[in-house]
Image (cartoon, helix red, strand yellow):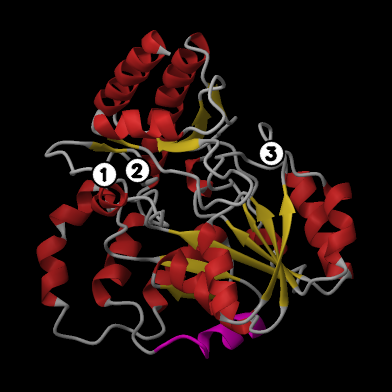
């Protein structure tokens, strides 16, 4: 069976399963802020319309200045991208033909982009259910690769790795002349987070990727940014197509990054919902990853392969993210986003029914 490789767009999943898409369903497969976009975007939407007659700023100066003020990083260390996906693609182009290490399980786009650029891809597998990042186990592999991708907090597990471990890893990689691509697409869902951006000046081997589409619920707009030393930014920008960021994305990004109270409100909401549903999972004997963000892995320990549970959920109009194409997970887990309280209640009702019969 050919599994769709992404969350969202559930019509492709139902089609692959030979099922018809229900009229009403709850999509838990895309890790987007359940509170929706900041209200300011709707208020200003007609203003955006006035700007579509003009070419976007190819240097994205206003948005870069906003990031500079927020993150205390110089403008020439910032590259704006058409979502995290474009930035991953640009990094993979820069690494064409090189040896790249992926810490699994992880976001499938790294491997796809690297393979498209004829990289040799190597793996380091973390062990379930705790998925701990152990530097001693990784150390032997770092001398044999040109770059490694690390997603923190991790997608699909939602686990936040210890900052001290990541810092030691960056130092170790620097000794081996190995790039570290740190994907922080979900960092802003963490209430306590030690930013690695201050280390950009110290480490020329560090590249940080951030997404604006997850926290601000704007995946249809596509926006993200990358932080690295200026010569790396220059190299990547030369690989980027002209006009890859549209005017609406730039304006939306500027407004979103002004919205600190929106971020704080989201973090509290997600934390409260996560605690509530995790308590339920424990009571019903489901196993979950120790996620700190807005999604998590779940499995029924009484099943090896979660296919039957997956099918049951789809029949009940709940769409989880399968893990058949995450190396090291191979369908033994399902990934769920934390949604609004009503959708989370629906999920708990359906899982309670499953447990009643299994």
Residue 339 in picture, x, y percent from top left: 33, 33
Label 3 to label 2, Cα distance in Å? 24 Å
Where is the C terminus found, in terms of image quarters? top left
| Residue 240 covered by magenta stretch | yes
Do labels 2 and 1 touch, CB within 8 Å?
yes
- Residue closest to the eye, 26 or 235: 26
| Residue 33 covered by magenta stretch | no
- Corner quadrant of residue 242: bottom left
**Span shown in magenta:** 231-241
From the viewer's perspective, is 19 left or right of 49? right
In the image, residue 278 sits, relative to residue 126, either above or below, namely above
Q: Which residue is mark 3?
A: 131
Label 1 to label 3, Cα distance in Å? 30 Å
Q: Which residue is mark 1?
A: 36
Q: Residues within 10 Å of mark 2 (few under 14, many from 20)?
A: many
Magenta stretch, overall SS: helix
Do labels 3 and 2 touch, CB within 8 Å?
no
Q: Secondary structure at mark 3?
A: loop
Residue 327 in picture, x, y percent from top left: 61, 52
Q: Secondary structure at mark 1?
A: loop
From the viewer's perspective, is 190 left or right of 138? left
Q: Is residue 294 visible?
A: no
- Residue closest to the eye, 330 or 54: 330
In the image, residue 205 sits, relative to residue 162, either above or below, namely below
Residue at figure coordinates x 55%, y 34% from the top left: 292
From the viewer's perspective, is 109 left or right of 130? left
């Amino acid at each position: 069976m050919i599994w769709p490789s992404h969350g969202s767009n559930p019509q492709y999943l139902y089609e692959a399963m030979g099922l018809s898409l229900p009229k009403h369903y709850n999509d838990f497969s895309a890790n987007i802020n359940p509170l929706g976009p900041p209200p300011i975007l709707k208020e200003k939407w007609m203003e955006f319309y006035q700007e579509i007659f003009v070419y976007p700023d190819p240097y994205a100066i206003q948005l870069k200045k906003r990031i500079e003020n927020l993150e205390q990083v110089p403008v020439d260390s910032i590259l704006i991208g058409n979502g995290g996906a474009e930035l991953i693609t640009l990094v993979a182009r820069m690494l064409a033909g090189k040896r790249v290490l992926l810490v699994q399980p992880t976001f499938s786009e790294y491997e796809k982009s690297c393979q498209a650029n004829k990289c040799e891809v190597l793996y380091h597998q973390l062990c379930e259910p705790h998925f701990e990042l152990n530097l001693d186990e990784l150390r032997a592999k770092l001398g044999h690769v040109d770059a490694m991708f690390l997603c923190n907090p991790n997608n699909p597990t939602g686990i936040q790795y210890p900052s001290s471990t990541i810092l030691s890893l960056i130092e170790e990689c620097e000794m081996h002349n190995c790039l570290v691509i740190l994907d922080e697409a979900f960092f802003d869902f963490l209430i306590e987070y030690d930013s690695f951006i201050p280390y950009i000046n110290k480490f020329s081997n560090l590249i940080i990727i951030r997404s604006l589409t997850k926290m601000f619920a704007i995946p249809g707009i596509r926006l993200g940014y990358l932080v690295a030393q200026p010569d790396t930014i220059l190299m990547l920008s030369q690989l980027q197509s002209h006009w890859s960021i549209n005017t609406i994305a730039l304006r939306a990004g500027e407004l979103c990054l002004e919205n600190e109270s929106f971020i704080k409100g989201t973090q509290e909401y997600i934390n409260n919902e996560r605690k509530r549903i995790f308590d339920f999972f424990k009571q019903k004997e489901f196993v979950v990853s120790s996620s700190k963000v807005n999604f998590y892995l779940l499995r029924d320990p009484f099943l090896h392969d979660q296919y039957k549970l997956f099918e049951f959920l789809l029949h009940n109009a709940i769409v989880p993210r399968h893990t058949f194409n995450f190396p090291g997970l191979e369908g033994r887990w399902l990934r769920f986003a934390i949604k609004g309280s009503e959708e989370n209640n629906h999920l708990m009702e359906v899982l309670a029914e499953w447990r009643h019969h299994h």
